[in-house]
Image (spheres, rainbow, N blue to C red):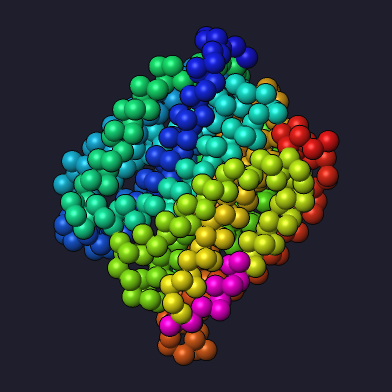
Amino acid sequence: MNSDHILSPKMLKFLPWLGAMAIFMQALDATILNTSLPTIAKELGKSPLEIQSIIVAYTLTIALLIPLSGWLSDKYGTKKVFQSAILIFTLGSTLCAFATTLPFLVISRVIQAIGGSMMVPVVRLAILYAYPKSELLKVINFITIPGLIGPLLGPTIGGILVETLSWHWIFIVNIPFGIIALWMTTFAIPDFKHPVFKFDIRGLILFSGGVTVLTLIMELTSSRVIGLQTVLALTVVSAFLIGLYIYHAKHKQHPLIDLNLFNIRTLRIGIIGNLITRLGIGGIPFLIPLLLQVGYGYSATVAGLIMIPSATSNIIAKSFVVPIVNKFGYRNTLISNTITLGLIICMFFFLESKSPIYYIIPLMVLNGFFSSIQFTAMNTLSLADLDENTSSEGNSLLSVTQQLSLTFGISVAALILGVFRQAGFVNGVEVQAFRYSFLTMGVMTILSTYIFFKLRESDGASMSGKK
């Protein structure tokens, strides 16, 4: 590995801030649109079903291109690729802001997603290369928080912008962030390069194809756009492509993502933990605003504002994560925190249709606090034992997993809510469906603790400092 720049104190100081900004931009953009879809559909003269294409196009493009990020960064340099990503993302946002037709908006979202697919993986890879293992927990903890706050504040900001200005401002807000990020790249990100082998184009087609179809299934199923037969057919296609990739990777000397990465226990458990645990907790930012609007009758803006305490507790938790993991280690932290988080989600079951808001806010604060610990611990565990030769592929694999788990979490929450809405025992009371959904997801979260029992006390010691 080589860097075209000396790692100056200034660069090491501002690189985490640049990473935090990139994660916030992507996380905000992924959710800010949700509350605005009806307005956009009305102004463009399209049905809500048709307008869903702007969400699906963005998500699928992200899933398709994330595996490219590591190879491109190693070949052309983290600085150049990150600058290109920010520039493309900002250009896409600008085009979205000027869109007057649905096809133009969809194309603009695809351009935006091309940049978005590179931003977070590349800046995190630069951080992996720039800092010693002993400092990574602190740095990644810092840059992770905006990724938790973005989904909580996105619907709020989107609702306010649509109600006070117009939906175009949802995309305009990205432009100043993009300009600032571009300016920061001139002094805040090193240009790391790493020797690369010939790009595995067949592996990209198979792996990204399988992941993209899987993402499409989740997106369309949660929106109830497709029927069971189509779901089964797409599932077979996805499984076939991923199966072909596994066969391909086992027989190719330098595949896109080396399956031997799964021999690294901390990465394997971190990846599986991300997927399974987020099935229970990943949909909570989706369910709570719906509960506040549908169950309690709050407007989208007010419901969004009520989410702020959860975002605040996310920030507060930041100062506790490093000491907790350093003291108790990853195994004990993840086991106890996952169970605690599951119990908190279960407590939403006890909310009634007439429960006052001051019953809800403490639960949201607790959920935000322990979610912050959970995500930071899972993500840093995944990176704990990567070295110079595995950082790029391992980081790309983690990025793909995070994107999938985000989609899975929301889709599973939507499916569970739909099941209970149709069930007779909710007695037609809307809040009842939410109560049983929270209970189910809380139990799922508690059961997911099993994966973390497979950790050893010493796992992640290089990052946690617990020997």
Relative vertical location of residue 32 with respect to residue 73 in this rendering, above or below: below
Helix, strand or loop: magenta stretch: helix
Nearer-the-camera pick, 344 or 40 = 344
The span picked out in magenta is: 344-354
Give above or below for 73 relative to 336: above
Compared to residue 262, the image places residue 197 above or below, namely above
Answer with left or right where residue 89 lies relative to residue 47.
Answer: right
Residue positioned 46% across, 20% down in the render: 188
Inspect the magenta stretch and tell me whether residue 349 lies in it: yes
Q: Residue at x 48, y 24 (%)?
A: 14
Q: Is residue 234 above or below residue 356?
A: above
Q: Position of residue 57 (x, y in %)?
A: 36, 47
Split into 4 quadrants, where in the image is the C terminus?
top right
Residue 53 shows up from this direction: no
Percent position of residue 318, x then y: 57, 44
- Residue 411 at x, y percent in the picture: 49, 61
| Residue in front for this viewpoint, 253 or 384 | 384
The total number of labels drawn is 0
Residue at 46%, 48% in the rendered image: 149
Q: In front: 86, or 327?
A: 327
Spot occupied by residue 365 in the image (x, y as percentages of width and height): 52, 60
Residue lying at 34% horizontally and 56% vertically, measured from the top left: 156
Q: Is residue 264 left or right of residue 132?
A: right
Residue 461 shows in this picture:
yes
